[in-house]
Image (tube, rainbow, N blue to C red):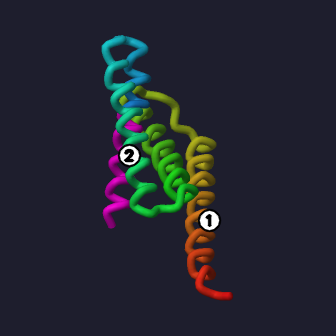
Amino acid sequence: MRKWALLVAAITVEVTGTLSLRASQDHSAWLVLVVCGYLASFYFLALVLRAGMPVGVAYGVWGAVGTAATAILAAVIFGDPFTVPIVAGIGLIIAGVLLVELGSRNHAGEEGTP
């Protein structure tokens, strides 16, 4: 459970950094939060890997959830477009990550077989 909490932290600070990058278009002071968000995100992501999560799963979930959350929050906060093709793309990303997760679990079950 700890590795998933660390992954949620990594996603949260990455999304914060990315939204701050968008906000920095109007006020450059937001760039401080951009740098801090990205540094913290990679730190937490490293902790996730140290906790034993496979890199493909960790990076896939981090990227997919981060992309979806950023798109949704940017639409709400900044009025960025949130169209049907964007929703479909996010759905495809999530489906791909689920396949990676399932493949990772199947492989972990096969390790003990000769």
Q: Is 97 placed above or below 27 here?
A: below
* Residue 24, numbered label: none
Query: In the displayed image of the protein, which residue is found farthest to the bottom?
Result: 114
Seen at 38% across and 42% down, the residue is 43
Q: Earlier in the sequence, mark 2 or mark 1?
A: 2
Check disc 2 and report its element: helix, strand or loop. Answer: helix
State the residue in front, 2 or 88: 2
The magenta segment: 1-16
Amino acid tagged 1: Leu
The answer to which image quadrant residue 36 occupies is: top left
Quadrant placement of the N terminus: bottom left
Q: Is 68 contained in the magenta span?
A: no
Quadrant placement of the C terminus: bottom right
Seen at 33% across and 20% down, the residue is 32
State the residue in front, 40 or 84: 40
Residue 54 at x, y percent in the picture: 52, 61
Residue matched to label 2: 10
- Looking at the rendered image, the disc whose residue lies closer to the viewer, 2 or 1, is 2
Q: Residues within 10 Å of mark 1 (few under 14, many from 20)?
A: few
* Residue 99, numbered label: 1
Q: How many labels does the image show?
A: 2
Seen at 62% across and 58% down, the residue is 96
Residue 20 at x, y percent in the picture: 37, 25
Residue 27 at x, y percent in the picture: 34, 11
Check disc 1 and report its element: helix, strand or loop. Answer: helix
